[in-house]
Structures are given as structure tokens and as C-alpha cells.
Amino acid sequence: MSNLLEFLGVSEREDRLYRALLRGESCRPDLPPQGTEKDTTPAEPELTSLVTLGLATRTPGGAVRPVPPPRAVDALIDGRLRLLREDLEGEVAQRAVIESLFMERQTPVPPHSRNGGENDRSITQLHGIAAVREAIDELTFFARAEDLTTEPNGILTKESIAVSHPINMRLLRRGVRMRMIMGAAALEHETTLSYMRKLASHGAEVRISHLPIERVIIIDRTAALTPIDPARTSRGALLVREPGLVATLVTLYERMWEAAEELPGEDTDMPSDTERKILAVLRKADKDESAARQLGMSVRTYRKHLAIIMRRLDAANRVEAALIAHEKSWLS
């Protein structure tokens, strides 16, 4: 059979090995696949290659299992698109395409496409939603490491999701770390909650804040957007590139992030992994300092999570929280 996956970057050998795994044949490198030719015996590097391509996963015991075909092909497509995008972005940068187009508009070139300069250390007023969205497009195009955002209102309209979704997926495909803090109203808004879970399934980190939060977007910790008027965000935003001010906004963001809680999963009656670990330690540790140390987190963070657990369980104290958690089968 010809290699149907060749156009997706899969070698003939990898194609045959993946098919052997789908047939349930041996997935251990020290055992040849049953009923296949000797040269199809998988070696460790080849199995690792399948895992890297997204065609297989490795179990805790070291065995390699095939990924279902729809997911496998989707992973291959994403991989090829990522490589193609990197090639095209490299060509765009080499040809200075963005700079050339901005010159036609007589608009300052975005800071990420230049090599620094005094103009980078400025605050620019952007008037109106259209100008803000254009700035977000420009900043995220050059994003390479991190995207930090908040949504104090907690509710996203279908229109705003339609605008932001392509940008968010583009960032996630490029491997940009995306963190989002949503207002508590998101938990009661089906459209928003569903979209947040979708982004989380693609690698975004989402938290819910029950405290007031400020509206801010920070890209690569070098540029930030804040509302001109927090009470009327439609007026526009301030584009901040001054390093000192951006650093201050990053510090503010980290504080809001620490005070927020994890996005609940589909089954909201079950604890998160962090909550399960805290409950397990709660039964053994006699002091918060000891428990936090065992979990590798600060005492403040530990107490924040513990308070959330007690609120979810409607427990008056920690002992009652442990008892209720046991009754709800949260603890094994």
C-alpha cells in the first residue's frame, strides 16, 4: 500500500508502523509486530517519532498506543500548518512586508517589527473599537512568547468570539502561552463558558476571578493595552510600550492571576487536580506551612485554594471539608 500520509510529512516507515499499531500489533521496540515483515520491527527512535508527530501516545508503563485516526490526521495537519506559517512569517520578516505596508499608510511601524528606539517607549491613544482591534491584530501577529488578557465583565458575545477566535487559535498553534482571567459571570454564561473550555482544550490557561479585576492585554511583556476609560471601553485604549509601565501592569496581572481560581471542568461537581492534591494533604499535614511545602506552592496560594474548596463544599471548617469531600468520593 502506498504511503497516503506522505504529503502530511510522514515517512513510509512511519506510515507502516502507525498502521501496525492500529491493527493492535506489538508496540514494544523489543518485540516485532505480529504478521509483518522483519524490517517493520519498531525501534525506540521510530516510536518516539510517532509520538512527536501526534500519531501515538506513550503510557506511564512505556508502551506506545496509536492515536485515533481523526485526531492523528488533525495533529499532522496542525503540524504542517505550523511549519508553513513559520516559513511564511520568516519570509514576511525578511522582505519587510509589514514595514512596507505601514509606510503606504504613513503609520508608525509596530514595535515588534523594529530593533528598538525611542518611539517604542511611548503611550499611544487608540480611539474606537476598530482601532483597538487593529492594534491587537498587529501585536499578536508578532507575539512569540506570551499573551495575557483579562475580561472583567466575564461575558463574551458571539460577535466578539468570532473576532477573537482566529487570533487566539493562531497564537496557540504557534506555541504562545495564553493566560486569560475571566470575571465570575462567565460561569453563568453558557456561550462564554463553552468557549473558554474550548480554548483550554487547545492549551490556553483560564482562571475565574470572584474579585474585581482590571481590563488589560499584555503581549510578550513588551506592550500592553488598557482602556482609556474603564467605564466606557468603547472609547478606545492606551497602547503602552514604556518598559517600566508594562512591567507594572505585568505585576498587577500576576496578582489578579494568583487571586483567581481554575476554570471548572465539564463536571463541576468533581474537584480539579490541584484541589484533589490539597484535600489529600489536608488529612495529613497539621500546619498550612507544611502542607504548602509538600505541594510546592506558597502558603498564600495554598490558603486561597483551600478557601475555594471550603466554599464549593459549603464547609464551615477544614475538618468538615475533609469529611464532606470523603462523602462525595473526592478522595480515594
Image: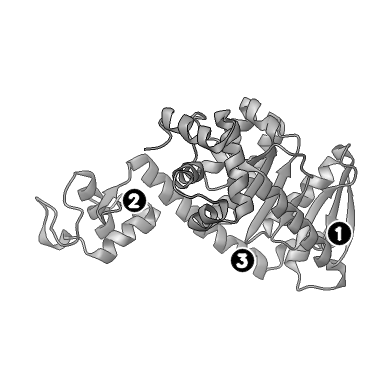
Q: Can residue 110 be seen?
A: no
Residue 47 in the image: state x and y as whole percent: 27, 59
Secondary structure at numbered mark 3: helix
Q: Is residue 106 above or below residue 72?
A: below
Say which of 173 and 82 sits in front: 173
Of badges 2 and 1, nearer the viewer stands 2
Residue 331 in the image: state x and y as whole percent: 41, 37
Q: Residue at x 89, y 56 (%)?
A: 124
Across the whole image, how many numbered discs are drawn on residues?
Answer: 3
Q: Quadrant of the C terminus?
A: top left
Q: Of callouts 1 and 3, which one flags the residue occurring earlier in the amino acid sequence?
A: 3
- Identity of the amino acid at label 3? Glu
Q: CA distance from mark 2 to mark 1?
A: 46 Å
- Identity of the amino acid at label 1? Thr
* Residue 67 relative to residue 170: left or right: left
Secondary structure at numbered mark 2: loop
- Identity of the amino acid at label 2? Leu
Q: Are marks 2 and 1 in contact (CB under 8 Å)?
A: no
Q: Mark 1 — residue?
A: 107
Q: Mark 3 — residue?
A: 91
Q: Mark 2 — residue?
A: 55
Q: How is the image coloured?
A: one colour
Residue 257 in the image: state x and y as whole percent: 67, 49
Q: CA distance from mark 1 to mark 3?
A: 22 Å
* Residue 77 relative to residue 124: left or right: left
Q: Residue at x 55, y 42 (%)?
A: 200
Q: Count neighbours of disc 2 (C-alpha within 10 A) and say few if under 14, some if 14 to 19, many if 20 or more.
A: many
Q: Residue at x 32, y 51 (%)?
A: 56
